[in-house]
Amino acid sequence: MNEPIPVTRDVDHGTAKLMPDVDRARAWLLTVDGAPQSYVDLDAPTHLEFEYARRLGHVLDTVAEPGRPLDVVHLGGGALTLPRYLAATRPGSRQDVVEADLGLLELVAEHLPVPDGAGVTVHGADARAWLEAAPDGSADVVVADVFGGTRVPAHLTSVAYAREAERVLRADGYYLANLADSAPFAFLRAQLATFGTVFGELALIAEPGVLRGRRFGNAVLVAAHRPVDTVALTRLVASDAFPARLEHGLAVREFIGGARPVRDEDAVPSPEPPDGAFGIG
C-alpha cells in the first residue's frame, strides 16, 4: 500500500501544502504559507481537529434539533471541513461555500473531493460580493471563516457587511464567525459592537486564557435575533480537551465596553498574530 505523500502547490494567495497525518489513514492538514488552514479526515468527517472548528461545530449542533437539514452559507472554504461535518451530521443540508482562492479550490477538489450527493456547492468568489448578491432570507446559518493569510480582511468587519449577513439570514438564523485577537482586544470588542448594532443576541466562545489576555487566540462570535442555547453550548465547549468559556448577555456588553461599531471607511483587518501563534508544532 502506497503511503500518502505531501502535496505542495502555489495557489492564488500563497503556497498551499497538504500534509498527511501519520496517525490517521486518510487525514490531511492544509496549510497556506505555513499557517494551518484546515484539517480533514476523509474517513471521519465529524472529526474536528482544530479547537475553533470544534466550537463552531458545537454551535451548529445546537442551532436546530439534531439531524435537521439546514441551508448554510460558508464564507471561506479551506478544505471544506465544516461543510463535510454538516453533510454527515445533518444529511440533506444545502450548503454554499464561497472561497476567493480558485487555485486552492482546485487543489482541494483534486486531492480531497467532497462525496457526490453531499449537497455542497462551491463558488469561486469574494465573500462579501457573493453575499451582497445572495437572496434575502435564504440561509439558516452564515459561517464566516475568512482569513487573508492570517488576518480577517477589513471588508468583512463592518456594519454594512453585518447588515448583508443579516439580510441573507432567515429571521431565526445565526451568524457565526471565527475571529482572532489578543488583549486589549480592540478588534474583537469592535466586532462585537458592530454585530450588536444589527443583531439582538450576541455570544462569544474562547479559551479562558485568551479572554484573560494571556495569549493571542481564536474566538467564535455568535449573533442572532433569538437566544443562543447557552445551557447546551456551555456544556459542550467546557467538555472539550481544551475547555472554552461561553460569554453572553451582560458579560458581552461589559466586554464591549466603549468600543464603537466599524464603518466601511474605518475598517481594518484583524491584527497580525505573533510569530508562532498559529504555527505547526
Image (tube, grey):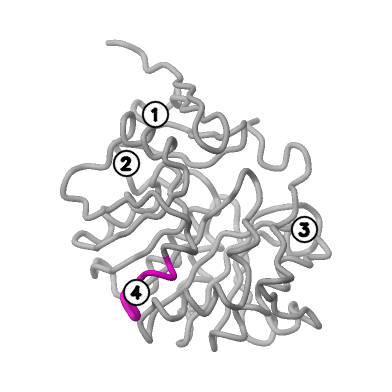
Residue type highlighted by circle 4: Asp
Mark 4 to mark 2: distance in Å?
25 Å
Image marks 3 and 4: residues in contact by CB distance under 8 Å: no
Mark 2 to mark 3: distance in Å?
33 Å
Label 4 sits on a secondary structure element that is strand
Percent x, y for residue 88? Answer: 26, 53
Residue 240 relative to residue 47: left or right:
right
Compared with residue 269, is residue 139 higher up or lower down, i.e. above or below?
A: below
Image marks 1 and 2: residues in contact by CB distance under 8 Å: yes
Residue type highlighted by circle 3: Ser
Residue extent of the magenta highlight: 131-140
Compared with residue 110, is residue 39 higher up or lower down, i.e. above or below?
A: below
Residue marked by disc 1: 24
Residue marked by disc 4: 140
Give the residue displayed 31% in from the left and 30% down from the top.
110
Foreground mark, 2 or 3, reads 3
Residue type highlighted by circle 2: Ala
- In this view of the protein, which residue sits in the foreground, 7 or 238? 7
Foreground mark, 4 or 1, reads 4
Mark 3 to mark 1: distance in Å?
33 Å
Q: Is residue 253 magenta?
A: no
Query: Which of pointers 2 and 3 lies earlier in the amino acid sequence?
Result: 2
Residue marked by disc 3: 182
Compared with residue 20, is residue 113 higher up or lower down, i.e. above or below?
A: below
Mark 1 to mark 2: distance in Å?
10 Å
